[in-house]
Image: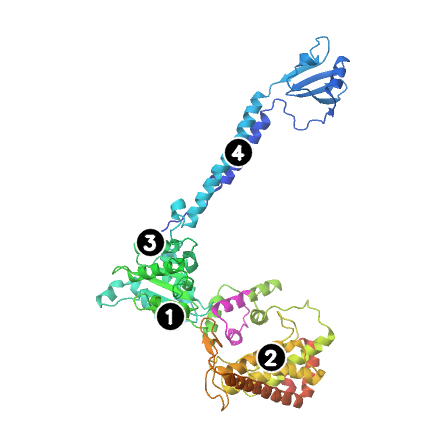
Amino acid sequence: MQKYRPKNSQGRNPFFVLMLVAIAGAALMLFAKPDLNLFPPKPERISITELIEHYKADELKNIIVKDNTVDAESFDGAQYRSIKEPGTTIVDLGLNDPLKRARVEIIDTSATEFWTNLFVGAIPLLLLIVLLIFLFRKAGSAGGGEGGPFGFGKSKARVYDGKKHTTKFIDVAGAQEAKDEVVEVVDFLKNPKKYEKMGAKIPKGILLVGPPGTGKTLLARAIAGEAGVPFFNVSGSEFVEMFVGVGASRVRDLFKTAKRNAPCLVFIDEIDAIGKKRGNGSGGGHDEREQTLNQILTEMDGFEPGTNVIVLAATNRPDVLDQALLRPGRFDRRVHIDLPDMEAREQILAVHAKNKKFDATIDFKSVASKTVGFSGADIENVLNEAAIASVKTRSASISQKHLDEAVEKVSMGPERRSRKISEKEKQIIAHHEVGHAIAGHFTENCEPMHKISVISRGNALGVTWFLPEEDTYLKSEQKMKDEMVSLQGGRMAERLIFGQTTTGASNDLERISRIARAMIMTYGMGGKTLGPVVFAEMNRSRGIFELTEKEFSEDTAREIDREVQSLVEEAESLCEEILKKHEKELRLIATDLIKKETMTREEFLAYFE
């Protein structure tokens, strides 16, 4: 197991040592001067001839000769400086007349020059030594921290003591099925003999699969905390270097260290960085990533019996992993961690609210209903934003208003009240957003309208927020058609009130076209001509359907375009009919929305009671 190594203290820091040496040398040079004077007056520069004339006139009190510089002081306090020719003595200059009152002093600088030359000559050597020490230590830390520059191939895994690890299963909310899948792993690490007695083998590898932010890493830490065993944490990208063989060397060192500390857990985060499917030879057999993957395959399949080392790995892209990595004997168990449902979101809110101060009137259930599609990380971010907002407003606790604002900020972006919008544009934006709300309200299957706002958020000039009342996993054909009608509401309201449309509906049209094309090409909801045929395949790595390859004729393509256009025009026609019927309410609500800036569902429904 890697030992904890404290950071360099000041006494061991090479740059600190260099600074001390520089200060000592400067002090040595300073105090080695016999004529130490910290604030000397600035002398007048004169020629050596003029200085000799002052000497002959017996006007000088002191004369100091230092190397080729001659400094003189007169009886009235004047300072002079002159330069003599090299090799010229005071006798040659005539400055040795015993009848003159001037005191002549000659300073020998040989001792000072010796120390100065020694110090200046030692600086490059000291810098070179410090640089070498720095490079050796950096090379040692890049290779795992052990062995100096020879530790470049050592594992970079962080080691945590399981007995001191505080994360438990209770801290992982909203993933009950995933916890049930790994509970026997904890039991095996605690009581391996019970399973060996029955001839049972615990999975060597467990792959945690789920969208980003759903708690894969948290679950791995909880397993280690529950089992009380050492926990090796490393990211897949830390194995990959530009030097061939380094990644494989680090894998060998990681598993070697893990076996010495068995029973233990090895957690490889983002394993898709090194576990992608191997190609058809492109890049050759010396590809660094492939060699790292091959070494992982060898190490996982080569565990000695009774080693008790379990490998956990996390990824949100299981479809790109090599099949050899997923076969039984390696990662032979796959645990899915999905986005939390309503009940799970409420549990996650309760977990992250433990160290925060809330009002007694807080309703976490309402917050959970507004966070459909949020991951655990998103929910944690909502509570953090609410806490920050309460501090900004100098509140004693976090209120329901803070939570609602935080949900809107995380899902739609922060408000941009500084954006200057003209009155005419405000009118267009208000009618556009109210058009969405009315069109959605008078369709049977559209989600309920939650809030309308003309306050700019992110890139949007206004927002109409529809929220589902419960978690749904299927969409009917009619529901998608009603969504298209609601999306048409903005531009149709602009055309009805102002006689023309604007660029504000570009995103709406893009979403309408995407829904219509998905209905025809992906879900087999075309007419009799096309029938229930899928013309697009899902790109699993991106989680969306897209046209990967054209496998149909030009006539079929024209028919697809015709039916897509027919769906869009049908939604447009129905939306226009709804808005014309409720034009009076459209104008009235838009006028009130401009004054209020924000309108809730209850306020909106009051216009139709």
Mark toward the start of the polypeptide (2 vs 1): 1
Q: Which mark is residue 123?
A: 4
> Which circle, 2 or 1, is nearer the viewer?
2
Secondary element type, mark 2: helix
Q: Nearer the viewer, residue 191 or 59?
A: 59
| Sequence-earlier tag: 3 or 2 | 3
| Separation (CA) of disc 1 from disc 4 | 61 Å
As drawn, 391 above or below 449: above
Q: Which amino acid does label 4 sit on?
A: Ile
Q: What whole-number distance in Å separates the C-alpha atoms at marks 3 and 2?
A: 57 Å
Look at the numbered discs 4 and 3 and tell me whether their residues touch, using CB distance below 8 Å: no
Q: Would you name the residue on which mark 1 appears?
A: 335
Number of other residues with Cα within 10 Å of mark 3, as a class: few under 14, some 14 to 19, many 20 or more: some
Question: Mark 3 or mark 2, which is nearer to you?
Answer: 2
Q: Name the residue under label 2.
A: 509
Residue sticking out furthest to the top: 99
Residue type for callout 1? Val
Label 3: which residue? 257
- Is tag 1's residue or tag 3's residue first in the polypeptide sequence? 3
Horizontal and vertical percent for residue 392? 61, 63
Q: Residue at image x 73%, y 75%?
A: 423
Whether residues under marks 3 and 2 lie with C-beta atoms below 8 angstroms apart, the answer is no
Q: Which span is picked out in magenta?
A: 358-384
Q: Is residue 523 left or right of residue 309?
A: right
